[in-house]
Image (cartoon, rainbow, N blue to C red):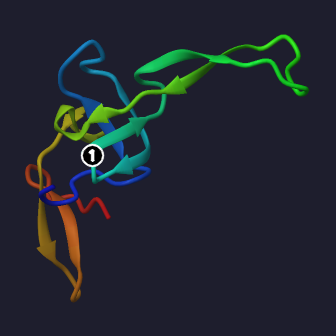
Amino acid sequence: MSIARIKKNDTVVVRSGDFAGMTGKVLRVDYSSDVAYVEGINLVKATVRRSKEKPDGGFREVHKPLKLSKIMPYDANLKKGVRITRVRSADKLVRRAKKTGKILD
């Protein structure tokens, strides 16, 4: 893992694959396997076993992970993804968009 470009609750855009161009909010990030779960993207149907709560069983939608290399932070003003850099601001490292200078943290 390099730097933490993507964090929970960030708005991101998918760069490649079947969902290229779609945006969503990050629900969870797993840095050990370099994946993120993005709201509304890469949903699959999973089966639910029969139980007392659901006697008929059925299906539910679950989020599948996306590799961190396929997503990048989204800037609503530019309406596209932006690259970021880390800069020191007030004795703290923050993420800043390279093109606009907007602070993401």
Give the tally of numbered discs.
Answer: 1
Give the x, y percent position of residue 80. 21, 32
Q: Is residue 58 left or right of residue 78?
A: right
Give the x, y percent position of residue 23. 35, 29
- Judge by depth and name the residue closer to the eye, 12 or 34: 34
Question: What amino acid does circle 1 point to?
Answer: Ser
What quarter of the picture does the C terminus occupy? bottom left
Q: Is residue 16 above or below residue 32?
A: above
Q: Residue at x 78, y 14 (%)?
A: 57
Identify the image quadrant of residue 81. top left
Identify the image quadrant of residue 92. bottom left
What quarter of the picture does the N terminus occupy? bottom left
Q: Residue at x 42, y 27 (%)?
A: 64
Q: Is residue 90 left or right of residue 30?
A: left
- Judge by depth and name the residue closer to the eye, 17 or 93: 17
- Judge by depth and name the residue closer to the eye, 20 or 56: 56
Residue at the limit of the structure toward the bottom, as seen here: 91
Give the x, y percent position of residue 88. 14, 79
Q: Is residue 83 left or right of residue 14?
A: left
Give the x, y percent position of residue 93. 20, 76
* Mark 1 Cα-neighbour bin, 10 Å: few <14, some 14–19, many ≥20: few
Identify the image quadrant of residue 97. bottom left
Q: Secondary structure at mark 1?
A: loop
Q: Residue at x 24, y 45 (%)?
A: 34
Q: Is residue 12 above or below residue 17?
A: below
Residue under label 1, please give it.
Answer: 33
Q: Residue at x 21, y 89 (%)?
A: 91
